[in-house]
Image (cartoon, rainbow, N blue to C red):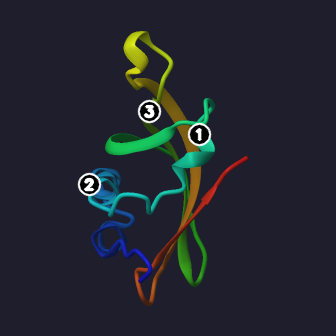
Amino acid sequence: MSPRLPAALRAWNTEDFIQVLKTEMRALDSGVLPLFEGTSQGGLVDDSDIAITLLNASRDEAAVWLDVGVFFSEIVGGCSCGDDPVAENAYCELRIRIDFATAVADFWPLS
């Protein structure tokens, strides 16, 4: 099932849009966002505590288009004393398309 961002879509073009978008994105199921593009050490993505920054927003006839920066943690195993995993800060930029008719959100990593 495709992720949906209906509250963000309803808040589009209002003062509350950015906060609603952030809240709704944080509530998405783990693994929905393609954050692996932001990993640099072959680690695992920990998306349990992400921070989101809106970089750009526009719309066309069918959808809202967003570019966002996402800060998260990358868990890298076996690189510290005792072979314990360590968390490293990571960052990824994503493009989001939210369909006006369905509120379905598609996510792509930005190069």
Foreground residue, 11 or 70? Answer: 70
Asked whether, in this view, residue 79 is left or right of residue 13, the answer is right
Is 85 left or right of 69, judged from the image as shown? left
Q: Position of residue 106 (x, y in %)?
A: 54, 71
Among numbered discs 2 and 1, the one appearing first in the sequence: 2
Is residue 17 placed above or below 41 in the rendered structure? below
Q: Which image quarter: residue 46?
A: top left
Distance of mark 1 from mark 3, alpha carbons? 12 Å
Q: Are marks 1 and 3 in contact (CB under 8 Å)?
A: no
Residue at point 47% right, 29% down? 77
At horizontal 51% and vertical 31% (from top left) the residue drawn is 90
The image quarter containing residue 58 is bottom right
Task: Give the residue number, with chain letter if any, for mark 1.
Answer: 38
Mark 3 Cα-neighbour bin, 10 Å: few <14, some 14–19, many ≥20: some
Q: Secondary structure at mark 1?
A: helix
Query: Mark 3 belongs to which amino acid?
Result: Ile
Q: Which mark is residue 75?
A: 3
Judging by the rendered image, the residue that carries numbered circle 2 is: 23
The residue drawn where x is 38% and y is 14% is: 82
Task: Kindly report the distance in space between the C-alpha atoms of the residues bearing marks 2 and 3.
Answer: 23 Å
Query: Which residue lies at the image location 58% right of the left edge and 45% below the top edge?
Result: 93
